[in-house]
Image: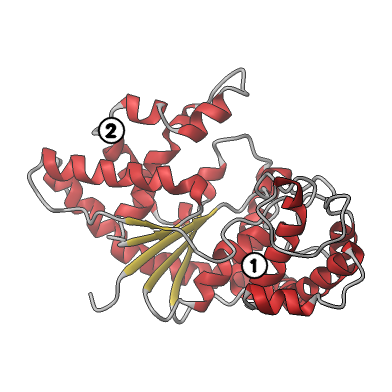
Amino acid sequence: MSKKRVFSGIQPTGNTHLGNYLGAIRNWAARQAEKENYFCIVDLHSLTVPQNPDELRYETRSMAAMLLACGLDPNQSTIFVQSHVQAHAEGCWLLNCITPLGWLQRMTQYKDKSAKQESVLTGLLDYPVLMAGDILFYDAHEVPVGEDQKQHVELARDIAQRFNALYETEFFVIPQPIIPAVGARVMGLDDATAKMSKSQADKRGHAIRILDDPKEIMHSFKRAVTDSGNEIAFSSDPEKAGVNNLLGIYKAVTGKDETAVLADFADARGYGDLKKRVAEVTIEMLTPIRERHDYLMQDPAELDRLMAVGAQHARSVSQPKVDDMKRIMGLVVP
């Protein structure tokens, strides 16, 4: 392969927010020509919690429109829906049969989420294996993820190495987690010590959702928590976390370094000006994406066609990999 392969997945459910865009999606679009990319809408993963079927179908198409509106190009990247490619679910069972239960029980997200539930669904425990398959069935070298997903890529590495050792082969490529250096951690506007979260994005004032209209974006930034001072500067002081977050967002949106960012606010008259200007550059960046998304959603048949093209190519790569895996494990493949 002349280019390294990259696999990235994103759930269709929840409100895609500014942190998702700055930390992941924008980088996917900007660098898609450099690698052989597979961008997957992981709708099977969303089933680890109960879903409204009609809403899930809508959100899956909406996510496809979102990715396209953010600049992912079907002519450069394979964009597809996870459940449209049978190899993911089929191969997950094969990986289940070599993955020790203890590996799954130690996963941080499983422990955190299961502690909050009276009845834990099997899918919540098992979805890291499905995620491992997502990566391994495409021989992905790199997996861009946030810090909270790094452990899952490490599990995929462990599973790949275990399979290779059990069957004395070099069948699976060992993937590497890639943590974006810029804009990787956008904090909540209501709590600058906690990462902006899809699960909290419905709470007013917490997140900037990509599809929010300009008035809502401005309102959310104006409500952002700062402190009792008025100094606009980058600081390691925990009390300045809110100001740091706003400056960090401005830096990520504009692409400027810290010196240039502070120069832009040299004439600011306090935190009100800071919030307003951060809102303005964010609105300027997100408005064309929202408008393009809304345009694409007017033609669901075309969205489905584009996803079908992506799924066909994804199947051409992943199904032979799973079939070879079955042969290695001793199954009769027709």
> Residue 225 location, x and y as percent?
83, 50
Comes first in the chain, label 1 or label 2: 1
Q: Residue at x 10, y 42 (%)?
A: 167
Amino acid residing under circle 1: Met
Q: Secondary structure at mark 2?
A: loop
Is the N terminus in the top left, top right, bottom left or bottom right quadrant?
Answer: bottom left
Q: Is residue 44 left or right of residue 201?
A: left
| Circle 1 SS class | helix
Q: Residue furthest left?
A: 168
* Residue designated by label 2: 99
Taking the spot 75% from the left edge, 52% from the top edge, the residue there is 240
Q: Nearer the viewer, residue 111 or 184?
A: 184
Tell me where residue 294 appears, x and y as whole percent.
Answer: 75, 71
Under mark 2, the amino acid is: Thr
Instruction: Specify whether residue 207 is in view.
Output: yes
Q: How many marks?
A: 2
The residue that appears at 81% across and 45% down in the rendered structure is: 203
Give how far apart the Cα atoms at labels 1 and 2 are. Answer: 34 Å
Q: Nearer the viewer, residue 294 or 262?
A: 262
Percent from the top left, x then y, of residue 108?
48, 33
User: Which one is in front, 64 or 182?
Assistant: 182
Instruction: Give the residue number, with chain letter if any, for mark 1.
Output: 66
Considering depth in this image, is 152 or 299 the residue closer to the camera?
Answer: 152
Q: Is residue 247 left or right of residue 146?
A: right
Residue 300's place in the image compared with 184, above or below, is below
> Is residue 217 depicted above or below 101 in this figure?
below
Mark 2 surroundings within 10 Å by alpha-carbon count, few (fewer than 14), some (14 through 19), many (20 or more):
some
Crowd class of label 1 (few under 14; some 14 to 19; many from 20; radius 10 Å): many
